[in-house]
Amino acid sequence: MTLPDVDELLETAGFDEETGVLTRRQAEVLALRERDIPQADIAEALGTSRANVSSVESSARENIEKARETVAFAEALTAPVQLTVEAGTDLYDVPNRVYSACDEAGVKVTRTAPELMKLVGDAAGDAVHGREVRRDITVSVTSDGTVRVRE
């Protein structure tokens, strides 16, 4: 199998090892995996084992998740709206609480109540089960109306 030009893929995507959280090898593996190239083909092209490619891919995805969490944390620090939704709260009560907090802060939320409930339920993972918030979660809204949920 002929693989795409990895250098070209990385350049097009704007990869910069100096400023990013991924090593060059991690970026190479992800660029190829995102194009549905099998790990065995990548391993052969890179002169390594499939197990090594799997490990590199796993590390890269973990680094990306850590970077996302860091960005979410930084946004939460500066968000004008932050509210804690306590364990035991009915998910159906969350939109009104978010809207009230946003009204007080002068922030416009661009999501409907059903959209907010879905976003909170999905983003909170197992902290929300059915309609019940089982563990405290933090909902923050940035000045541009972006809603973030953290456990």
Image (cartoon, rainbow, N blue to C red):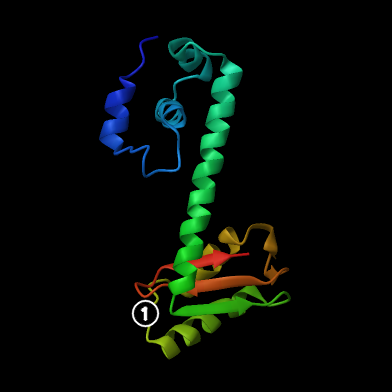
Kindly indicate the quadrant of the structure image that contains residue 83: bottom right
* Quarter of the figure with the N terminus: top left
The residue located at (44%, 74%) in the rendering is 79
Q: Which residue is mark 1?
A: 108
Up/down of 120 relative to 32, above or below: below
> Which secondary structure lies at badge 1?
loop
Number of marks in the image? 1
Evaluate whether residue 15 shows in this view. yes
The residue located at (41%, 25%) in the rendering is 32
Q: Nearer the viewer, residue 55 or 20?
A: 20
The residue located at (57%, 33%) in the rendering is 58
The percent position of residue 151, horizontal first and vertical second, equals 63, 64
Instruction: Please identify the residue farthest to the front as the structure is shown.
Output: 18
Kindly indicate the quadrant of the structure image that contains residue 5: top left
The percent position of residue 51, horizontal first and vertical second, equals 61, 19
Circle 1: residue type: Lys
Lateral position of residue 120 relative to residue 5, left or right: right
The percent position of residue 114, horizontal first and vertical second, equals 51, 70
For label 1, count other residues whose C-alpha is less than 10 Å away and answer few (under 14), some (14-19) or many (20+). some
Q: Nearer the viewer, residue 53 or 40?
A: 53
Lateral position of residue 116 relative to residue 16, left or right: right
The percent position of residue 20, horizontal first and vertical second, equals 40, 43
The residue located at (40%, 76%) in the rendering is 109
Up/down of 17 relative to 66, above or below: above
Instruction: Please identify the residue farthest to the bottom as the structure is shown.
Output: 104
Evaluate whether residue 129 shows in this view. no
